[in-house]
Image (spheres, rainbow, N blue to C red):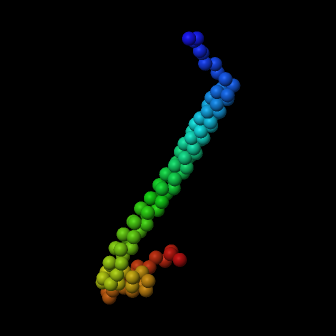
Amino acid sequence: MANKTKKNTPHKSKNRAFVFVTVAGLLAYFIWSIFSLNGTLSQKKQELSAVQGKVAAATKQNEQLKMQFSSIGTPEFIESRARESLGFVTPNEKVFIDANKN
């Protein structure tokens, strides 16, 4: 029997080139996608950080408002509001007025 050797035919060579170009194209697409997603991920992390800061500030303000709400109606609150808003003073209290203040 004769020893048969396989020769690359033009058809097989074209198939290999097509497969190589296709794989290289897909690889390039995936690498581009990874870098694109990395930039998007960094942007979203910054947005998340900003939103978390806003949530922390809102939570702090909410706690302050809860404290103020719980103090409404107490004698101390009523007295402070009367002093600040209406200028009330208690009997026999000495009030000093700053003459330099407009």
Most extreme residue toward the bottom is 91
Q: Is residue 79 left or right of residue 37?
A: left
What x and y, as percent, mark residue 76? 31, 80
In this rendered view, identify the residue nearer to me: 83 or 39: 39
Most extreme residue toward the left is 75
Is any atom of residue 93 visible in this view?
Answer: no
What x and y, as percent, mark residue 102? 53, 77
Q: Residue at x 67, y 28 (%)?
A: 11
Q: Residue at x 43, y 66 (%)?
A: 58
In this rendered view, identify the residue nearer to me: 54 or 78: 54
Q: How many numbered discs, if any? A: 0
Q: Residue at x 32, y 84 (%)?
A: 73
Q: Is residue 97 left or right of residue 43?
A: left
Q: Residue at x 44, y 79 (%)?
A: 97
What x and y, as percent, mark residue 31? 57, 39
What x and y, as percent, mark residue 78? 35, 84
In this rendered view, identify the residue nearer to me: 72 or 84: 72
Most extreme residue toward the top is 2
Image quarter where the N terminus lies is: top right
Is any atom of residue 61 visible in this view?
Answer: yes
Q: Is residue 21 above or below residue 68?
A: above
